[in-house]
Image (cartoon, helix red, strand yellow):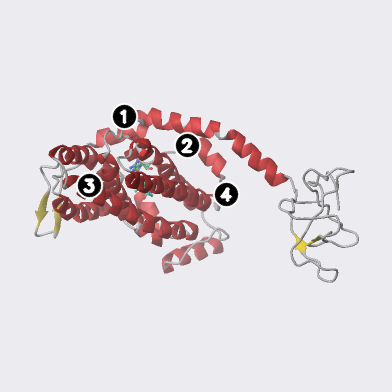
Amino acid sequence: MTALQEQFDATIGRGDRIEPRDWMPEGYRKTLVRQIAQHAHSEIIGMQPEGNWITRAPSLRRKAILLAKVQDEAGHGLYLYSACETLGVSRGELTEMLIEGRQKYSSIFNYPTLSYADVGTIGWLVDGAAICNQVPLCRTSFGPYGRAMIRICKEESFHQRQGFELLMTMMRGTDEQQAMVQESVDRFWWPSLMMFGPPDDESPNSAQSMAWGIKRNGNDELRQRFVDMTVPQAKALGVTLPDPDLVWNEARGAHDFGQPDWSEFTQVVKGNGPCNAQRIAHRRAAHEDGAWVREAATAFAASPLVEVRGASATNVPLVGVRGASATNVPLVGVRGASATNVPLVEVRGASATNVPLVEVRGASATSLETEGEN
Ligand code: FAQ
């Protein structure tokens, strides 16, 4: 065993964190890329089922809540893509892998949202399951993933509460509203249990992921935790969970419950769920529609242009450039400048003896294109 491997094992053994600069086994890196990317894709694809209802929210308040929730999910996706980038894979590459079907996302988002009650049910059950699964990931062994999870979990808790509150409001409403909630819970209960992954004895990744401290608990333990947490909440709401085998087991101090249809799970994960094709087609179209934004952002980042407000002919500020020296004179280009139209640059607090410094993003000796100079 190499000294690097020993150091890695010792860090994991102490329960300390591995950081991107540290040596890590290739299998550890690959497992993290797989899980974090899958998680990021789930957040991004997960915007679709609820986003479906933004234009049809029943009130301004519900619309504002739903918009904020869907935006939070975009944010979660971005933190997670950033965590994954520290492992040497770019967000662009990850997105390609998603839309080409080479990486997965959570099975749950391949089910349709057929009524507004589904917005509440997703908050209550799907975010509830996400919290059970993800709170332990705040202690995962890879630093950037664990730190991203802390903020994500705080926001998911809020999402879960808004879902519960929405359902509670509907359950205090008309018979039709109550029936709508029950119908929604009936559809989402089993897919929510599937979110935790296959049973431990059919989970090829769990043992190694737990040995590496990536996962802190097995799939079955977390599924059990979710059921135990949810049963009293269902009672408070007045809905029935659609499982005839669900019963409190005094001896175990936990609920016994039935198994989801694992053949359905396998089909959904393979791409044959009710909405898989639609979700990926939508994501692909959004990615293609956004190509011009990425091109513009890339071009902007590569052009070291500085625009300065408020300059005048008599008030010519001085612009110093960090790292400049007599032999290394960096060039500053100014947007719209030409030989006859020399733009002026004003810098707050500048004086003959106090020359402020301006740093230009992406500037290098070869990347500077000067349209004009001061
Ligand atoms: N769906 O050996 P295991 C959210 C795959 S975020 C699809 O047990 P592992 C927020 C698994 O990848 C929800 N595929 O795998 C939100 C593996 O295939 P692979 C996402 C699944 O990784 C709320 C194979 O089956 N959360 O909800 C699923 O050790 C509301 C064998 O499985 C996360 O990603 C599944 N459900 O354990 C957003 C949490 N389960 O990759 C919008 C982080 C398993 O070898 C609205 N991830 N597979 O080809 C994890 O904790 C783990 O990756 C598990 C799976 C527990 C999901």
Label 2: state its secondary structure. Answer: helix
CB-based contact (under 8 Å), mark 1 and mark 3: no
Tag shown at residue 88: 4
First in residue order: circle 4 vs circle 1: 4
Tell me the distance, in whole angstroms, between the alpha carbons under discs 4 and 3. 42 Å
Front: mark 1 or 3: 3
User: How far apart are the alpha carbons under marks 2 and 3?
Assistant: 33 Å
Mark closest to the chain's N terminus, 1 or 3: 3
Q: Amino acid at mark 1?
A: Pro
Q: Amino acid at mark 3?
A: Leu
Whichever of labels 2 and 1 marks the residue nearer the N terminus, that label is: 2
The type of residue carrying mark 2 is: Leu
Q: Position of residue 280 (x, y in %)?
A: 43, 31
Q: Helix or strand or loop: what does disc 1 sit on? A: loop
Residue 98 marker: 2
The residue to which callout 3 is attached is 167
Give the residue at mark 1. 274
Sequence-first disc among 4 and 3: 4
Q: Is residue 2 visible?
A: no
